[in-house]
Image (cartoon, helix red, strand yellow):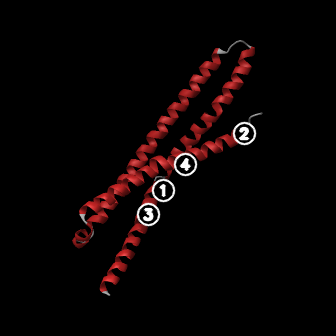
């Protein structure tokens, strides 16, 4: 009977720790609102450039061809593509810095939580399983932020930019 109560209490403690971990994670995530909105703004600017470059070049070629100044279109294309490249590099660097800081803070919380556990817990579970759990969770959080989260937001903004551009383009 005592063993069942201990297992239920351990399960309750585990779920409570998970809830606290999520609360801390989202609190840290939204503490840097300015950085998040800056990254989203750079993503939106990248999406707008990605969508608008072909349309701007098409209009430029049509208008400048009439006055025999097509080489200006080439200069315009180079400037727009370099601007897109620079904004993309800045955005990627900001995402990497943000995810590194967030994952580092979460990793510290995980290690702090492990250190608070009683030594009898480690006799039952084993150190190898604890380390595997920690490394898996940290790598999962890092991939969710830097890969999946970025791709989801970027593709949503690409769709929004295409939707906006569809109002300005004659087909």
Between the residue at mark 3 and the residue at mark 4, the CA separation in whole angstroms equals 20 Å
Marks 2 and 1 in Cβ contact (< 8 Å): no
Q: Is residue 105 visible?
A: no
Residue under circle 1?
Answer: 30
- For marks 3 and 4, the one nearer the N-term is 3
Mark 1 neighbour density, 10 Å: few (under 14) some (14–19) many (20 or more)? few
Residue occupied by mark 2: 166
Give the residue at x 43% y 68%: 19
Q: Quadrant of residue 18?
A: bottom left
Q: Earlier in the sequence, mark 4 or mark 2?
A: 4
Dot 3, crowdedness within 10 Å: few (<14), some or many (≥20)? Answer: few
x then y, percent, for residue 169: 74, 34
CA gap, disc 4 to disc 1?
18 Å
Sequence-wise, which precedes: disc 2 or disc 1?
1
Picture layout, residue 77 above or below residue 109: above
Q: CA distance from mark 3 to mark 2?
A: 39 Å
Callout 4: few (<14), some (14-19), or many (20+) C-alpha neighbours within 10 Å? few
Which is nearer the N-term, disc 1 or disc 3? 3
**Which mark, residue 152?**
4
Residue at mark 3: 22
- Identify the element where label 1 is drawn: helix
Query: Image quadrant for the N terminus?
Result: bottom left
User: Which residue is painted at 42% across and 44% down in the image?
Assistant: 96
Does the CB distance between marks 4 and 1 fall below 8 Å? Answer: no
**In screen coordinates, is 77 left or right of 170?**
left
């Amino acid at each position: 009977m005592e063993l069942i109560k201990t297992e239920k209490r351990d399960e309750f403690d585990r779920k409570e720790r998970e809830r606290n971990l999520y609360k801390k994670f989202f609190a840290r995530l939204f503490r840097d609102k300015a950085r998040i909105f800056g990254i989203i703004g750079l993503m939106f600017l990248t999406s707008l450039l990605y969508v608008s470059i072909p349309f701007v070049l098409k209009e430029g070629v049509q208008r400048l061809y009439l006055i025999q100044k097509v080489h200006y279109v080439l200069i315009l294309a180079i400037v727009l593509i370099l601007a897109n490249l620079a904004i993309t590099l800045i955005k990627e660097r900001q995402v990497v810095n943000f995810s590194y800081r967030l994952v580092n803070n979460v990793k510290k919380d995980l290690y702090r939580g492990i250190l608070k556990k009683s030594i009898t817990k480690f006799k039952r579970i084993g150190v190898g399983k604890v380390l595997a759990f920690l490394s898996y969770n940290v790598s999962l959080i890092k991939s969710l932020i830097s890969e999946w989260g970025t791709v989801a937001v970027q593709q949503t903004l690409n769709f929004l930019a295409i939707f906006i551009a569809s109002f300005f383009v004659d087909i």
